[in-house]
Structures are given as structure tokens and as C-alpha cells.
Amino acid sequence: MVRKDSFTPDWYEGATPVDSARSLFKWHDPHAFKHPNQGFYTLLRDTFGLKDADFKKPSLCLEKFVIEVPPSLDVELLAGLESLVGEENFTTDTYERACASYGQGMIDILRLREGIIENICSAVLYPKGSEDIVQIVSFCSEHGIPITVFGGGSTVTRGTEATKGGICLDISKHMKLVLDFNETNQTITVEAGIFGPELEAALNHAPERFGAGARYTCGHFPQSFEHSSVGGWVVTRSAGQNSTYYGKIEDMVLSQEYATPRGILRTPAYPRCATGPDIDQIMIGSEGAFGILTSVTLKVFKYHPDNTTRFSFLFKSWEDAHKAYREVLQGEFGFPSVFRLSDPEETDTAMRIYHIHNSIADSLLRWMGYQPMKRCLLIASADGDRDTACLIKRKTTKVCRSHGAFPLSPFGVTKMWEHSRFTDPYMRDDLMDFGILIDTLECAVTWEQLPEVHQQVRAVVKERPRTICMTHISHAYPQGANLYFIFAIRYQDINDYLALQYSVLEAIRESGAAMSHHHGIGKQTAPWLEEQIGQPCMDIVRALKAHFDPSNIMNPGGTLGLDMSEDQREKRWGFR
């Protein structure tokens, strides 16, 4: 509980003005906020050597956005584009263009906070459907106009940045329809601009919406779930927080439709086939470089919220924890849905957030051998049929107890995490107001690689004095998992941040881990991609690009490591 005499920083709780600079970088809902609680605030203050007085007079960026950047496209071309969608679905307003070209990556936010507007499109178009997109792609192909696509804007890899100018298609305004629901095949077909909550609501209420005999779920819940589009999920190969059970998005896609400069590409909706290379898998993760996803057919699952079982454990060491974690994934008795293992530093942070740090319960845990900066927290849940969910919980509990884990289920830790899992990013806004930056980078590893990658990346972050580096595993498979690093620093300027980001990306590549597990590549990680996958594989990506987009108009300027200069590759883009 927070002491009555505890200090409260000057957190901002007002609504974000819709025409302000802050509205461009705020985490989505302009009225929402989430402050670090007293335990987390104290940790941050003490780690960075700050005083309570340093948390007064924040930098809020509430002033009106007044920057004007003229479109670079000719007036005649802009008029031609406007004629395709109508005046009401076309804008050259600088604010709207900046909104469509910047994402939620830290480099985006830092630039916006400093009033740096660059690499933005010349116009934003709001297509009403796939027919509009086909016409726009044809027009842009004829005139050599670059195209980027905006869905929910939650990209953290500079995915929509218009480094070559051109136009942006915002598919989130109109393209939100459910095109088909097939209960026999257990599939749903939707337009690419539909957001997660809209899709989930349709499936949860399938009996009322479609006359279905049961309720369904997509099972895909990324942290950006409330503010991201299905199209964005597909083209970045995203994962959700329940993906250990339901799978990543590439496991859910059955068929797709793309508008490309070569024409419309449709794939059939077979669950499996042996008709040569899988075209769906070629297009998933293409990040708009081959064409524009207009609709997608997804597998869906029965929705059994009353059957979900929640459980959690505390381990004495990281080694014990990830051994037990791997044993569960290789146990062949089914997979948990949420299965999130925190390393010692993240666990200690969680102890502060959940008000366990220095409590009577904490003293008891220490007496039992669960020591600070050694212990590891595992939160979990199991979904599906009631008997299946109970089996997974029982088997997982047996494995964890065999590795010395202490059960925390009675304390409701998993439920507390679920309550905040989509709102935690709002804390980022608060902390950056006072010069504290929290960012994330993630990678995929085999079980054999995991200990060394974890150690190497943490070592790079910790080379910087007074730095927090938390790590967790949140998606896993019998053969390996992802490592998700969250680091917090006091930053000086953009280049100060980039120096750390680049060093972490270098450490991931040098360790042999995959550069991304679910955030995609975009333009941020592009300079490392060819070194990661090798020239033979990169040549295939280039060949696909040349086939689908011979004039290089589809999200050009570095996406997927394509059309980059040697200078850009060597300097890792750089900034100033």
C-alpha cells in the first residue's frame, strides 16, 4: 500500500488535445493514462540517481502542432489520386500525413517530441474497399508513386515511414468488414483494416451475429491488440500473448488477397496441401513490399472463457526456471496459453509493482530460499476444453514443483497481469515526460542458445551505468522460444538512444539469435537482415520483390533490407 506521506510525481492526467504534438506519439487512447505505482516509481528514481524534485514540471508537448511540410508530389498527380477516392477520403494535411508515417517505435517518439518531421508521405488516402486499392496501385504503378500502408499505427520498426515519399493508404477507416464466417470450416474472412477488438467481438458473439451454434475466438492478443489491425498482424508475422497455445499469426492464416503491381493475388483456403511452395508463407511477413493485403481468412477456435485456469510459480533461479519451462513445452501433454517466464531482474520489478517487495510475504519467501535477483516468476493460464485445461495445469504444476517452484496461484498474480497487459504501454508516456525511456527488443532462440543469448544481450545493456534490463519468455515451442528484452535508461538525445539500440541489435545478431520473433523487420532492423539470413536467402527476397514490384513502389526505402545503399547498411541508418 502507498504510504500517506509518499511523493506523487506530476503525472499528467488530462486528455491529450487532438491537434497537439503529444497526440502524435501518445499510446493511442487520448484520454487514457497509466502511472507507475509507488514501488515501480521508487525503483526508477533510485536506479537513475534522481530525487523526487526531478519529477516535477514534466515536458508534455501539449502545444498545437503547427509544422507545415508541403507535399512533394505534383499537383496534377495529387488531383488524380483524389479523384480515385473522393475529396472526403483524401488529405494532404501535414498532421494527418505525420500520423500515417510515424509509428510507436522509440525513434518515432523521440523525433516527434523534438518536433522533427521527416520522411512523411505527400497524401493520405482512405480506400473504401479492395476495388479502390486496385485502382490506386494501378495509378501509382503508371506514375512511379511510392505507396505505404497504415493500419493501426503500432509498428515499432519504422514500418510505415515514407523514406521515398509518395502516398499512404489508411485502411483502418473503412476496411473493417467481416466478409464471411464459416462455422463448418471454423474460419472467418475479414478486411485487413479490422482491429483486434472488432474481430474478437464478432467471434465472441457469433451466435447473435451469424446464427452460429457456438462462440469463437481468434486467440491472437498482442500487447497492441486494442489498437492494431489484422492486416498489420499478418504482414509483420506477429505473435499474441496467448500464442503458445493458439499459435502465431502465420499458423492462423488460411488464405489471403493482395493487390500488387502485377495484379490481384489470391491464395486458396486449404488447411494443408502439397502444391509446391506455400505462397501464403511467402506473403506473410512481406510488410507491404510485395503488395497490399486487402483481406484474409483466419482459423478460429471455440471460446471457453469459463474454462480458463490460471496459475503461477516462483523459482529459485533462472536456470531452474527455464529448464522447467522447456520441460513443459516438450512434455507432449498440451500447451499452456499464457506462459510468461520473467528473469530475476524482471521478477524483482514485478515484486515491486505487485507490492510484494519488503512485505511479510517477501520475508517468508527469502527465508525459504527465493532470493532477490535470483528468483524467477512464471505466470500461466490454460484454455480450451475444461478437461484439457485442467490437465495442462496439473501437468505443468507437477513439472514446476519438481524443479523447486513455489506456487503463487492463491495470490492471483496471473489475474493481476491480465488486468494490465494492454495498458502498460501508457506508462511510457509518463516516464518520457521526465527523460526516462523504456523500450523493447526481442529475438527468437533455440533452447540451446537461450542461456548465452540472455547473458550476452544483458551484458551489452548493463555496460551503460544505471540501466534497467528486464527479460521474459512469452512465446515458446518444443524447440525454442523468444526472449523479450525491456530496457529503461535516462537518455540525453536521439543519438544517445540509437547507440544503445544498435549495440543490442548487434549483440542479438552476433549471438546467433533471430533478429525478430514477432515485431517484423521494417526499416529499423533492415541493415542487419542480410547478415542474419545470408546472401542466398536475401537473393530470393530480392527476386520476389522484382517479380511483384518491378518499379519498386511498394513500401520502398529499406523495408526488409531491400533497396538500401551500402552507406545506409554500414551506418545502420544512423540519424544525424
Image (cartoon, grey):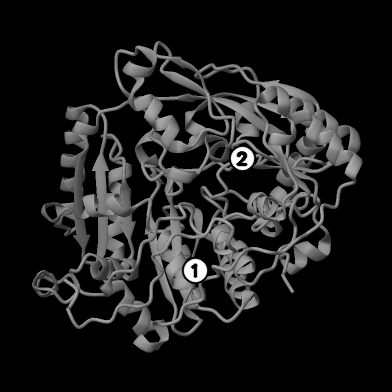
Q: Residue flagged by tag 2: what amino acid is it?
A: Gly
**Which image quadrant is residue 103 in?**
bottom right
Q: Which sits earlier in the primary sequence, circle 2 or circle 1?
A: 2
Q: Which mark is residue 457?
A: 1
x 59%, y 29%: residue = 175
Q: Residue flagged by tag 1: what amino acid is it?
A: Val
Labelled pair 2, 1 in contact (Cβ < 8 Å): no
Q: Which residue is mark 2?
A: 285
Q: Horizontally, is 561 left or right of 189 in the view?
A: right
x 29%, y 47%: residue = 327
x 64%, y 63%: residue = 65
Q: Horizontally, is 14 left or right of 176 in the view?
A: left
x 41%, y 63%: residue = 14
| Residue 564, percent from left and from top | 80, 55
Nearer the viewer's eye, disc 2 or disc 1?
A: 2
Q: Relative to the observer, which residue lies in front, 361 or 314? A: 361
Cα separation, mark 2 vs mark 1, equals 25 Å
Q: Is residue 247 visible?
A: no
